[in-house]
Amino acid sequence: MSGRRSCTDKLLSAPPADPVFLRRNPGGVTIQLRVQPRARRLALEATAEGGLKAAVTAAPEDGKANDAVVALLAQAWRLPKSTFEIVRGGTAREKTLMVAGDPAVLADRIAEWMRQKD
């Protein structure tokens, strides 16, 4: 047997692709998600389409729902709330958040959360 690796071996050893809702940037990652305020319970889940949905019990008043979303993400991914910043959609259900830090570490942490949810 030669020392060459087949194309199949290369595919099997490649790291998994990032989820659709995550984009790596030089200073961290951006996360796109849909928020459901005034939900009956707190929930964070990946959708069948590969998106991310956050349900929070807080009302969308005075930034309370946004604060609840940040707290939910921080708890689920075991990250400090101070690393999160809403960069788009502050008053909309569709939001984009920046998470500051090492993009590889953050992507791994989020991938770990997704594996635990399965």
Image: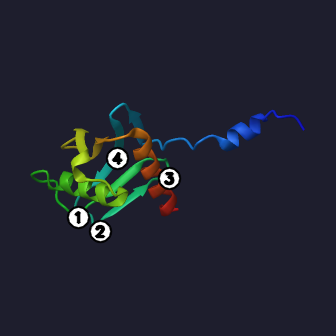
Density class for disc 2 (Cα within 10 Å; few <14, some 14-19, many ≥20) is few
- Residue on which the image places disc 1: 57
Answer with the quarter of the image where residue 31 lies.
top left
- Residue on which the image places disc 3: 48
Secondary structure under tag 2 reads loop
What is the spatial separation of the Cα atoms under label 3 and label 4, in whole angstroms? 13 Å
Decide: is 52 above or below 11.
below
Q: Viewer-nearest of labels 3 and 4? A: 4
Dot placed on the residue nearer the N-terminal end, 2 or 1: 2
What is the spatial separation of the Cα atoms under label 3 and label 1, in whole angstroms? 23 Å
- Residue on which the image places disc 2: 41
Going by the numbered disc 2, the residue's amino acid type is Arg
- Residue on which the image places disc 4: 33
* Residue 39 in the image, given as x and y percentages of width and height: 27, 64
Density class for disc 4 (Cα within 10 Å; few <14, some 14-19, many ≥20) is many
**Residue sitting at x 52%, y 62%:** 118
Give the quadrant of the N terminus: top right
What is the spatial separation of the Cα atoms under label 4 and label 1, in whole angstroms? 16 Å
Density class for disc 1 (Cα within 10 Å; few <14, some 14-19, many ≥20) is some
